Structure formats: structure tokens, C-alpha cells
């Protein structure tokens, strides 16, 4: 029975959407230890209702800043996360500052282009967990500290 339930989820073709606006760079500074730190105000809007089926228990969602540096080809910083308990809560608009600190190990963030990526993990009642994401490119940090 569990196999049939899990198989039925593969017939679902979700079409989630998301948009993120960086409304303000609250501060951009060099910490005393030499690392760059950024605080941003964000509008996060998403419609993840199509991820829900009869077999979905909840969806874990998080927003990450992703960028490259000479030392690492991929840096991921989690800025915000949440648990969506039901389809009724899966369409949302959140106005927030980054929930977690956006810190780079070094001084690599000045003028840096980065992507904001909305990741999600669909947690079923039975069967395997599914994960996917929407990458939103084209963001850039200031050249100077503020």
C-alpha cells in the first residue's frame, strides 16, 4: 500500500513559483575578525500549493544566498526558513530581514553577484522525501561597506 501511495506522488507535476525582492541593505560591514557581514530586508513571495498532494505531511522551505569565491565554487548561506504545514499556508508573502547571519569567511562580498535560491523538501506521510529549488539570479552587493 505504501509503494502505491508513494508512486501516486510521482504523477503530480508541481509548478511552484517564487519571487524575492531585496528592499534594503540594512548594513554591510567588515567584522573585527576580517569577515564580511550583510543584513538585508527582503520580500519573499511564493506559491507552493502545487507541491501538496493527499500524501504531503509538510514542506520545509528555505531561502539561500549562493555565490562563488576564488576558494569555493559554491557558497550557500541560509537567510530564512520555514515549515509549511498545509496547502492553505503554501501561498505567502513575507516581509523580513535575513533570519540567519549572512557572513563570508573573508572579504569576498564587496560588489559580489549572487543568486537567491528558494529550496524546498516535500515530506510525505509515506514514501521518499522530494527536494527541488527555484534559482533567482541577478542580485549584487554594494562595492563599499555601509
Image (spheres, grey):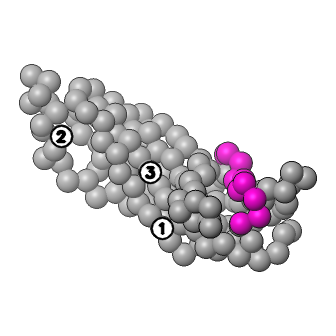
Is residue 144 depicted above or below 117 in this figure?
below
x, y percent for residue 143: 77, 77
x, y percent for residue 90: 41, 46
Label 1 or label 3, whichever comes before in sequence order:
3
Describe the element under mark 2 as helix, strand or loop. Answer: helix
Q: Residue at x 86, y 51 (%)?
A: 33
The residue that mark 1 highlights is 136
Label 1 and label 3: CA atoms lie apart by: 11 Å
Q: Residue at x 42, y 34 (%)?
A: 85
The residue that mark 2 highlights is 9
Q: Residues within 10 Å of mark 1 (few under 14, many from 20)?
A: some
Q: Residue at x 75, y 59 (%)?
A: 106
Is residue 124 depicted above or below 107 in this figure?
above
Instruction: Please indicate whether residue 26 sits to the left or right of residue 66 in the image.
Output: right
Of circles 2 and 3, the one toward us is 3
The residue positioned farthest toward the right in the image shown: 32
Describe the element under mark 3 as helix, strand or loop. Answer: strand
Does the stretch in magenta take in 107? yes
Label 2 and label 1: CA atoms lie apart by: 26 Å
Label 2 or label 1, whichever comes before in sequence order:
2
Q: Residues within 10 Å of mark 3 (few under 14, many from 20)?
A: some
Q: Main secondary structure of the magenta part?
A: loop
Please give the label number shown on residue 119: 3
x, y percent for residue 120: 41, 46
- Magenta region: 99-108
Describe the element under mark 1 as helix, strand or loop. Answer: strand
Does the stretch in magenta take in 10? no
Amino acid at each position: 500500500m505504501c509503494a502505491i501511495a508513494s508512486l501516486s506522488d510521482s504523477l503530480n507535476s508541481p509548478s511552484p513559483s517564487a519571487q524575492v525582492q531585496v528592499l534594503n541593505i540594512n548594513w554591510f560591514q567588515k567584522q573585527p575578525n576580517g569577515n564580511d557581514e550583510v543584513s538585508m530586508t527582503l520580500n519573499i513571495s511564493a506559491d507552493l500549493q502545487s507541491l501538496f498532494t493527499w500524501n504531503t505531511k509538510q514542506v520545509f522551505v528555505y531561502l539561500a544566498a549562493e555565490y562563488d569565491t576564488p576558494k569555493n565554487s559554491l557558497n550557500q548561506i541560509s537567510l530564512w526558513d520555514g515549515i509549511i504545514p498545509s496547502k492553505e499556508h503554501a501561498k505567502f508573502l513575507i516581509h523580513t530581514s535575513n533570519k540567519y547571519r549572512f557572513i563570508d569567511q573573508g572579504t569576498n562580498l564587496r560588489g559580489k553577484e549572487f543568486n537567491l535560491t528558494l529550496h524546498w523538501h516535500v515530506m510525505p506521510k509515506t514514501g521518499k522525501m522530494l527536494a527541488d529549488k527555484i534559482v533567482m539570479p541577478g542580485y549584487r552587493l554594494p562595492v563599499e561597506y555601509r
